[in-house]
Each structure stands twice: as structure tokens, then as C-alpha cells.
Image (tube, grey):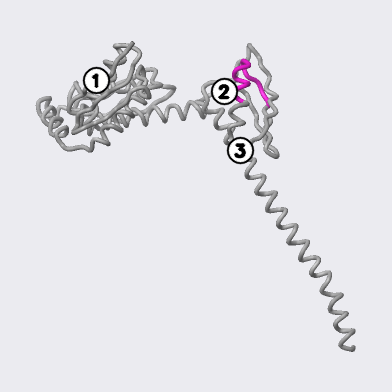
């Protein structure tokens, strides 16, 4: 075979191979894009559904979510028009969702089917309450260092473990009951007689308070205590701390809210005193 004919033969053989390789590369790229799209849409569906499950207004609703090409389709039942609109706005708030086909049906007498256990949203609510109560107990100068176990179910908090005196037991009840979302408190804490007596505990608390804690730490804990507590709008109260002295300023709705804000701040470990002259109501 001449060199010219050999080149022609090789060219005829290579052409289909190159075509097949290019086709395979194109197919692989298309498959990757398709897979990436499916993952994105699944993530968007999950994010929308999870937000519904966490919402106290939508968690009991029967809503199914599908996403395709940036469009979310909502199907199911809700109890009023407000919830239907809320479901739409939540879906539009998810990154990548450009349009919503809201097929939700409003039924005034709609009652969600009851499950045998806590819903996902209720479980998250309970976990949040437990974390808030534990945090407030850890920050409190009255119950610092207590061996307290906190459990929550349907907003009902149970406290178990031991404390060194009745005052600490009462403080734990007060702290838990004042936490946002708590329905009731079952205080099963027992006073351990082998622990230090009330006088020794008071001295220990005084020594703990005398330790220098960063003013920024105290400010953060006071603000967090307001955030987690009922009957206090923490966002309306400005908190500053200087050498352990906490200053509260801003406006509250009533004298009761003002008194509670002062009490909550005083209960935070490391606080020496609270200046609330600039905290007014009216």
C-alpha cells in the first residue's frame, strides 16, 4: 500500500473514532449538567419543605413541593388565604426560585391528620427550648455549676438532677419558666445534703462573681437572656457593661417589663449591679 493510500486509510479510521470521542464527551457533559440540576432542585425542595415544617403556621398543613427549572409547584391544603400566601413567599425566598405555581387549596374546616409522635417542627422547637434553658442556667449566678439535666417535650420542660440548696432549686424553676416557648416546668431537682450549705454556697457565689469576667461576655449573655425570655422585647433594649456594671437603655412596654429586664440582667453571672435609669416605659 502506497504512503498516500495509507494516510487516506488512517484518516478514514480516525474520523469515526474522533466523532465517537466528541459525542461521548458531549454526552458526559450533558449528564453532569443534568445531575447538577437535579441536585439543585432537590436541595431547593428540601429547603422549602423544611421551612414549612419549622413554621408554626404551616407545619400542620398538607403541602407537597416540587421544583423544576426555578419554578416551585405547591400542592395540598391549608386552612386560610394567609397561610397560602405565606407558603408562596417562603418558596420565593429560596435562592434560585423565580416563580411559584401556588395550587394550594384553602379549606376553612381543614384539619391535618394527627401523627403518633412529635412533628419535625415540634422536635426542633423542643430542642431549641432545651438549649435556651441550659444556656440560661449556665449563665446564672444562682445555679452556676449545677448538675441539672433539661429535657423538653411539647414545650413542657423537666428538670432533673441535684442542687446544693432550695434557693438554687427555685431559681432553676424561675429561669426555665421564663424561657420563650415553655408551657410548663416539672422541677424534679433534689437538694443534696452532702453539698455545701446555704452559707457556703453564698460565699462560693460571691467568690465566683468576684472573678473578673469580660464586659463583652456579660453584655452578650444579658442580651441573649433577653432574647430567650418571654415578656421582654430584647431588641428594644440596649445593653452596655463597664467593670461588671450593666447599663440598660431604651423603651419597654410597661413597668413590669422594665422590672423583669433588670432582674434578668442581675441574674447573669459576673454582673455587679444594674443601672436602668435610662430604661423607660410609656
Kind of element beneath mark 1: strand
Q: Is residue 66 left or right of residue 132?
A: right
Residue annotated with mark 2: 58
Q: Which quadrant of the structure image shows residue 68? A: top right
| Residue drawn at 37 percent across, 31 percent down | 131
State the image coordinates of residue 7 (x, y, percent, origin top left): 85, 82
**Nearest to the observer: residue 11 or residue 151:** 11
Q: Quadrant of the C terminus?
A: top left
* Segment colored magenta: 75-87
Sequence order check, earlier mark of 3 and 2: 3
Q: Which residue is mark 1?
A: 276
Q: Earlier in the sequence, mark 1 or mark 2?
A: 2
Residue 245 position in % (x across, y down): 20, 28
Q: Which mark is residue 44?
A: 3
Q: CA distance from mark 1 to mark 2?
A: 40 Å
Give the spatial CA distance, label 3 vs label 2: 17 Å
Q: Are marks 1 and 3 in contact (CB under 8 Å)?
A: no
Amino acid at each position: 500500500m502506497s504512503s498516500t493510500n495509507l494516510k487516506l486509510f488512517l484518516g478514514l479510521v480516525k474520523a469515526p473514532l474522533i466523532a465517537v470521542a466528541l459525542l461521548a464527551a458531549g454526552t458526559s457533559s450533558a449528564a453532569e449538567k443534568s445531575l447538577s440540576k437535579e441536585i439543585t432542585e432537590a436541595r431547593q425542595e428540601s429547603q422549602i419543605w423544611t421551612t414549612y415544617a419549622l413554621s408554626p403556621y404551616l407545619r400542620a398543613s398538607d403541602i407537597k413541593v416540587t421544583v423544576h427549572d426555578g419554578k416551585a409547584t405547591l400542592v395540598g391544603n391549608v386552612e386560610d388565604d394567609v397561610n397560602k400566601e405565606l407558603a408562596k413567599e417562603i418558596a420565593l425566598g429560596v435562592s434560585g426560585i423565580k416563580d411559584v405555581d401556588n395550587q394550594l387549596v384553602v379549606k376553612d374546616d381543614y384539619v391535618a391528620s394527627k401523627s403518633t409522635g412529635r412533628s419535625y417542627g415540634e422536635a426542633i422547637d423542643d430542642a431549641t427550648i432545651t438549649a435556651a434553658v441550659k444556656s440560661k442556667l449556665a449563665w446564672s449566678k444562682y445555679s452556676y455549676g449545677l448538675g441539672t439535666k433539661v429535657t423538653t417535650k411539647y414545650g413542657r420542660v423537666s428538670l432533673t438532677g441535684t442542687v446544693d440548696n432550695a434557693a438554687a432549686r427555685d431559681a432553676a424553676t424561675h429561669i426555665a419558666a421564663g424561657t420563650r416557648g415553655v408551657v410548663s416546668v416539672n422541677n424534679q431537682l433534689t437538694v443534696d445534703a452532702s453539698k455545701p450549705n446555704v452559707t457556703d454556697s453564698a460565699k462560693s457565689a460571691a467568690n465566683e462573681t468576684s472573678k473578673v469576667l469580660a464586659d463583652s461576655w456579660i453584655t452578650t449573655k444579658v442580651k441573649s437572656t433577653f432574647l430567650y425570655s418571654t415578656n421582654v422585647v430584647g431588641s428594644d433594649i440596649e445593653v452596655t457593661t463597664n467593670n461588671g456594671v450593666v447599663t440598660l437603655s431604651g423603651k419597654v412596654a410597661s413597668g413590669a417589663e422594665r422590672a423583669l429586664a433588670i432582674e434578668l440582667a442581675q441574674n447573669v453571672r459576673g454582673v455587679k449591679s444594674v443601672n436602668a435609669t435610662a430604661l423607660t416605659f410609656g
